Image (cartoon, coloured by chain):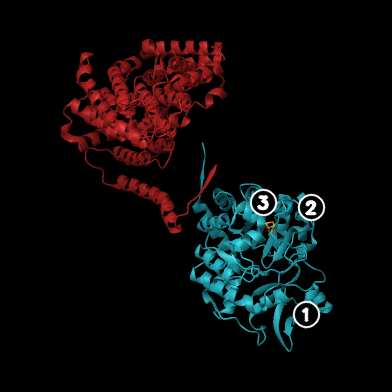
Amino acid sequence: MAIMKEKTKTYLHNPGYLKVELMLKGIRVDGKALKKANLDKCRDVANITCGLDIILPHNTWVTVPYADDFVNDSPYELIESEGKFFVREGAESVNVSVVPTPKFYRLKTTTGISLSKIGIVHGGHVAITPATQCDFFNKEIECRYCAGNPDIKKGKASVYTVEDVLETVEAAYKEGKAEIVYLSIGFSETADGGIEFLKPYIKAIKKHFNTLIAVEALPPKENKWIDETYAIGADSVLYNLEIFDPKLFEDICPGRAAIIGRKRHLDALEYAATVFPSGTVASHLIVGLEPIESTVTGIDFLTNMGVIPILPVYRPSPRAKLPHYKMPSTEVIAPVYGYLYRAVTTNKINTSWVRDISVVTTPLEGRFFVDDNARMQTFAQNFYKSRLGLKAAWSLATLRRKLRVKLEHSD
Amino acid sequence: MKVQIDRRRIWLIIILKSFRPVFFLATGLFFFYIINLPTPDGLTIQGQRAIALFVVCLILWVTGLLPLAITSLLAIVTVPLLGILDKKETYALFGNEAVFFILGAFILAGAAMHSGLSSRIALAIMNRFGNTPAGLVFSIFILAAVLSFFMSEHAVAAMLFPIVLEIAKGLNLKPGKSNYAKSLFLALAWGCIIGGIATFLGGARVPLAVGMLKEATGINIDFFEYTVMVFPTVLIMLLIGYFWLTRFFPSDIEDIHLAKSVFERKMKEIGKTGYMEYAVGFVMIITILFWLFFGKSLGIANIAIVSVVALFILKLVRWKDIEEYVNWGIILMYGGAITLGASMEKSGAAAWIANTIIGDWANSPLLVIAIFSLLTILLTEGMSNAAVIAILLPVGIGMASQFNIEPKLITYAIAVPAGLAFCFPMATPANAIAVSSGYITTKDMAKAGIVMMILAWVVFNMTARFYWPMIGIKL
Ligand code: SF4
């Protein structure tokens, strides 16, 4: 692993470091700049990732906290001058773009639900949780870091209809914010891991839009549901292990450990990596909730199976059950992302899929920590973001599914 | 619907998937290649085209890459398109008597099954004679055979299968292990196979062969005549079959009283014999008697269709009930095979092939019968028995007329062994049904079946050599 870097100079000119810094420390923004950016209120209705979407140099997307109290201590400030935005630290600054609030956030579905409640945009992706429910809460074995959307608790879930979701995707799609639609679902006591519930949504989206779909769910009990997930149209799947250390996993994720089990998480990921294309099977390992060495072991383990680790940094929430948690510093975290980049490239895992995620440092962004320009990968990623590339990715995914899926009539 | 993901390397999948279009392209090119070869001496241009079409159909029937019926439809439309026969004549061949006989037979068997008559007979016989392990195997074997005299062997296998399965379960026999279970399921399959060759009704292949013979030469074989010719083969094979079955899989149980309770429960389920069953039984008996005694003068297809009409007049069945028993695919397949066979014959292609390829050795009818029956019995293990007939019979008939051999004999030499597929599940639905139970493996079936296959060939040829002259057939 790369030697930890002491902060002796500004991180402004390294988008990788700057992204981590901004995610951890937030940014100060004055009212004038906010107005210019057309951002006068918190744009994330679910209040989990309330932040300002900024594009740093090298097309590095980041969602930066700006409304919480802790940002007052941040060394970073967003300023506006002649219509341009800069992130400033002391006397130095770097030119950035601020992503305007998606227009569709102001719209409502025909049934009167605000679209911003259903779909949240992160970079070029729209994230939708059709049923904001997780039965771990009902059993009081929820993941301890889970901020717990108020909707999640005690059967009070909002379930959006397929039509509501379609209207949201359509609006996001028209604005170019639905290159990938992320559908997520919490835990429910079914063998399929929730895929049967998501099926009509996936099918409807695939039927109406040429977009890619990622499913974030808990691992199903049997592999046949992973086959089903791919067959019905999911292009990517995330089964999040969150914590690699077995003991800490049991402690921090009691529901996942007791009902699903760590082994099943890993088995499901290993199997999914043989079903889905390279770089489309991913698992979160939260940085900071376990020793860094353990996260690194997890990175090795997952990448050896062909799974992409996604490493979000945990930000404490008053609603989570982790009172003694202390957020790690950029200097501690940065080498882990460099290591992630090396592990992913050594194992020849495609990095084009996990891109433009503004709330987490992607594996390819790990190149900023190891001074590698990753020319081929960035070229591929930029291509897949172009109009032609999006079409090609969609067509290849469709063709691959056609070739791989066999439907057998059971008569 | 079950989802399966092909997880092999994508390039391998692409290569495998492109096999199909490449195959069809290559077959098409091969077809045009044959058509454009210089026409050999003694062959007409129509004959050459008929051979090209025949080769393509042969490839498609053998590989099974298209459903048999679709290949047949392709043959039907291509015959007039290539000018081998004119349109009118081609489509008239499709309206062959054999096709309507098969249709009638399907409907009559459907009526027997729908009314519950066939199940009742099956249960009654097994209950009456199945008192010992050997007695039960024997009763299943003979019952399957006898029922296959009167209805399609596939239908008999499908009808008796659930009962045999329940017996095996009721006796707590171990799938894949119990010898007795193996003998029960083989008794079912072999009974159907042997019984299926006894009359025109056991399977549609005999009417197909007879139809092809009639279209090509004008010669007819009637219901009674056919049965008289093959009956010794059936009887001897039944004896051998039972003997071999009980020796190869000696019973490993002594008590079968549990099977009795299965019969009793099933009998209770179907209740007492109703009007429908009596009436359908009556129509069936009259029909069979007419086939036996008036088949020649009235035509077996006419008798079948009149009986079908009678069933509907008497309101014994509704079209809705019958539809599922009518295998339209088989009907289309047979229509096409007959058309192709006739086009081979009428264009002179069959005679040319016989002359050129088979040549001088075909001077003894017994040798010809031996060779055709051997070819048939081998081919039928790997492909549909109707396809075997469609492939071999046009050549066989062409050869018969060329070398002054009675074409009927060649027809028997192909039509009868075509039904005798003992070794593999893909050879005939009766075998497939038996293996699908899980009580018998393909390996068991092949091991026991290979001896039956050899014996069947020997018995058929012995019948031809010794029995046929006794009933006045000149070889
Ligand atoms: S699975 Fe864990 S993280 Fe996900 S919603 Fe349920 S409790 Fe929260």
Q: Chain of mark 1?
A: A
> How many numbered callouts?
3
Q: Chain of mark 2?
A: A
- Check if mark 3's residue and mark 2's residue have beta carbons within 8 Å: no
Outermost residue, right side: A31
Q: In the rendered structure, find residue A73 and report the number of the disc placed on it.
A: 1
Q: Nearer the viewer, residue B355 or A366?
A: A366
Left or right of A128? Residue B77 is left
Tell me what hue chain A is rendered in: cyan
Callout 2 crowding tier (Cα within 10 Å): few <14, some 14–19, many ≥20: few
Q: In the rendered structure, find residue A201 and report the number of the disc placed on it.
A: 3
Q: Which residue has dot 2 on it?
A: A110
At label 1, which amino acid type do we have? Asp
Disc 3 from disc 2: Cα separation:
17 Å
Q: Chain of mark 3?
A: A
Chain letter, red: B
- Give me the residue at 41% from left, 14% from top: B129
